[in-house]
Amino acid sequence: GENVEQHPSTLSVQEGDSAVIKCTYSDSASNYFPWYKQELGKGPQLIIDIRSNVGEKKDQRIAVTLNKTAKHFSLHITETQPEDSAVYFCAASHSGGYQKVTFGIGTKLQVIP
Amino acid sequence: EAGVAQSPRYKIIEKRQSVAFWCNPISGHATLYWYQQILGQGPKLLIQFQNNGVVDDSQLPKDRFSAERLKGVDSTLKIQPAKLEDSAVYLCASSLEVSTGELFFGEGSRLTVL
């Protein structure tokens, strides 16, 4: 089955700096790569996703990149703000009749004001 | 649009007791997932339903866990008997698309087994 590795497990940045979280996946059939943000006491919420036919996608201060050859993808957050503090999960999914989503272990991001 | 509803939010039980969690997905979402999230880890899929049918329960400990989705809407997840290692947050999610797409999560049910 799919295996998703994520690092770092914790990340502290100063407000205004950039944060980068990296993930690798093992199953070359995976074709959908979402990123979820989980705040304390809440369920994960999708913040951005990328499909395998795209190399990069941006949404305001958030961007994701995908390297299919190397089987890795990254989340970039620019101009970090205190409200960006949360746990971020990468995930990989493939559609073989039904969607099977495998999550990484998570990165706890702390933005220091 | 109402989100995914889960109850109870918190439950404390003794080991060997039983517990049940309930989930009501977003209206019209055919796919429903139960994930187990142990503290400090990512969500791990326990079972996935497509309408009434199970499409993946490969990681469900079937000797103690069971789940059903009646009429393709609400779902319950039961643990009997519970073990200490079952302490976790149980997340329910639903999705509109069959193949790939966003999962909408509930706030989860936190289980503590003493």
Image: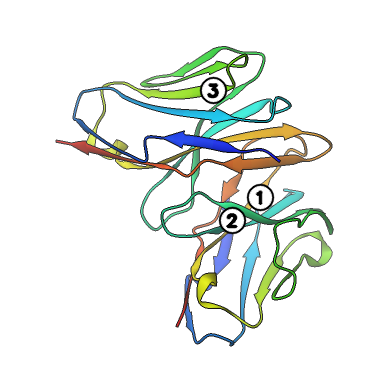
The residue depicted at 29 percent of the width and 40 percent of the height is: A85
Q: Quadrant of residue A17?
A: top left
On the same chain, marks 3 and 2? The answer is no
Q: Nearer the viewer, residue B84 or B94?
A: B84
Q: Which mark is residue B51?
A: none
Q: Give SS at disc 1.
A: strand
In the rendered view, would you say A60 is above or below A33?
above
For label 3, the crowd category at 10 Å Cα-Cα, with few meaning under 14, some 14 to 19 and many 20 or more, is: some
Which subunit holds the residue at mark 2? B
Spatial separation of the CA atoms under disc 3 and disc 1: 26 Å
Q: Nearer the viewer, residue A35 or A42?
A: A35
In the rendered view, would you say B22 is above or below A85?
below
Q: Name the residue tied to disc 3.
A: A72
Q: Name the residue tied to disc 1.
A: B94
In the rendered image, residue B63, in percent from the top left (x then y), is placed at 74, 74
Please name the amino acid that badge 2 sits on.
Answer: Val
Evaluate if marks 2 and 1 touch, with contact meaning CB atoms under 8 Å apart: yes
Say whether residue B78 is left or right of residue B98: left
In the rendered image, residue B87, in percent from the top left (x then y), is placed at 49, 71
For label 1, the crowd category at 10 Å Cα-Cα, with few meaning under 14, some 14 to 19 and many 20 or more, is: many
